[in-house]
Image (cartoon, coloured by chain):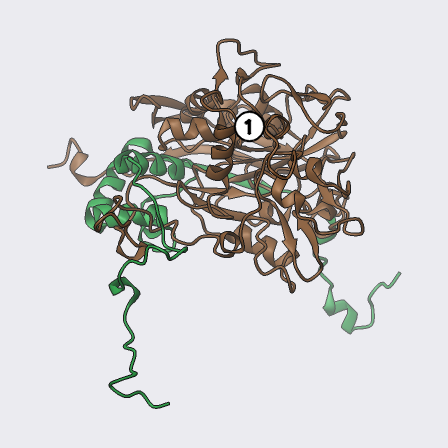
Amino acid sequence: MPEVHNWQLGRDMSYPYEAHYPEWQFAFVFNPNRCIGCQTCTMACKSTWTFSKGQELFWWNNVESKPFGGYPQNWDSKLLNMLEQANPGKQTWSIAEKDPETKPYGTFNGMTIFEAAEKHPGPEGPQAALGYLPTDDEWRHPNIHEDTATGGQFTQDGQYGGSAQLPEHKVWFFHLARICNHCTYPGCLASCPRQAIYKRPEDGIVLIDQSRCRGYRKCVEGCPYKKAMYRPTTRTSEKCVGCFPRIEGKDPTISPSGAPAETRCMAACVGKIRLQGLVKKNPDGTWADDPKNLLHYLIRQRQVALPLYPQFGTEPNGYYIPPRWVPRDYLIQMFGPGVDHAIEQYSCPDRELLAVLQLFRANQQIIFRYEIEEGPKVGELEVTMPSGESKVQELYNDTVIGFNKLGEEVVRVTIEEPTFERPAESHVNSI
Amino acid sequence: MEPTPDNFVPKVHPVTRPVEPDDPMNLYAVEVPGEPELMLRLLVEEYARMGWDLDALVGLFRDPFYVAAHGLWLHYGEEELKRRLTALLGRVGVVRTKTTTRVPPSERLVQIDLSTAAKGTADHA
């Protein structure tokens, strides 16, 4: 297999095809710290793209509650188990040799889904990417049981407790919104025996050519995130199309000037957890130096947002700010070894990071560049650091301005003086 | 067929049904340790950073459809939760922002002056 470079793993890796890179790459940052699992994004996508016959079980955008939820059920733990079986005890990272440019999270020592498939052929021969085909039951109930999680094991004479008998879940969980990651090295594309899947050179969106697809479901098997889905009525597979007409700027209501607009799921997010963007790529696949691009700032400069399961090896272009209250081991397994740094940065954002965070869901047009007009200091806030200690965060009357691809200003957000509502008993001068 | 004492199947609430180990849809999971206090504190910090005040937060936590927040409401109870929210907001403060969106030119509304049009003096040029 050809060798390609995966910056998220800090090394080269095997991939079935030679590397080709788009001019721009569709990418996004989600912030699960804010997500309340309202599913507005899910319904926005459903009502736009997957409301037809044969698409009943399609949720191109879904929000699952971790640690127990998954669509399809247990998609991630199943693949993690398969990788562990292929390479027992060696799915580890070396974090000693970090480099902000080439190895921001260190080096992954284990096997990707492509390498594991190459070295461990199954009974039906080698796969292009290690994977499995979920059952209909696993697709059918996207959110079943996940909110009512969990009780003790083996409650009755060696039997496990039924869901109806489990106690209310009152510890930790978080909502993980997911769409297709439009990976740089897609597992679906690698697995397709018909070469029906392609990555658009202009924006990196991964699409399935419906005229070439024969419905072999190899893409469903090979996508580690399980975002390619089989439609029985057409006998073809379908997947998230990245709302490409909007990315092309062809929605005259949102962007009359023709500038790219956010996808439906991003634009519908009421919790402001989403930030969509396009990242400029160099011909060799590295990110172009674009310091005032929001995604470049959050992902590459500050490393606040991390890829989802980077160890799968597809170089996903969806990034997440790790939820701060979740046990660290779980987060590191999910987002890689950059978690500690990301949470440290996010817990007490400096004035530039705080300003950039205000642009999440600030406008329906994609923001390509930001500027900050600095103002005076207006207050101090108490924040909780990962160690559990409190720290003081300074707040400034800054204004962050977002510009679209054409350089037009589309939004400005000003941070104002904070308000404090003190509990009555804390008034030191009360009589 | 009319129900008789011999063939009548009583309707029961699912909670009262016994466990069926071969039911593929029954949950099989283990509890993961966590700290509700930390989750509450960080959620409040997060939403306060977005400008949510006490009333908005209590409304969110009270709503059973927002299960993560509502789980904490169930855990602490309304009164205790309110007390904790007030104390937390008093410490961390609520960030306020002002957003100005640039309206695209095509969406500008044009006011037609009907008073002059009725007199037949409108300039149609």
Q: Viewer-proximal residue, A73 or A1? A: A1
Q: Residue furthest front?
A: A123
Chain ID of residue with mark 1: A
Give chain B's shade: green
Q: Viewer-proximal residue, A249 or A124? A: A124
Relative to residue A253, is residue A353 depicted above or below? above
Q: Report x, y in % for residue A111.
A: 56, 24
Image quadrant in which the C terminus of chain A is located: top left
Left or right: residue B98 compared with residue B102: left
Q: Viewer-proximal residue, A248 or A93? A: A93
Q: Report x, y in % for residue B25.
A: 40, 56
Callout 1 crowding tier (Cα within 10 Å): few <14, some 14–19, many ≥20 = many
SS at mark 1? helix
Task: Give the residue displayed 70% in from the left and 35% down from the top.
Answer: A190
Relative to residue A110, is residue A425 depicted above or below? below
Chain painted brown: A
Task: Give the residue displayed 78% in from the left and 35% down from the top.
Answer: A202
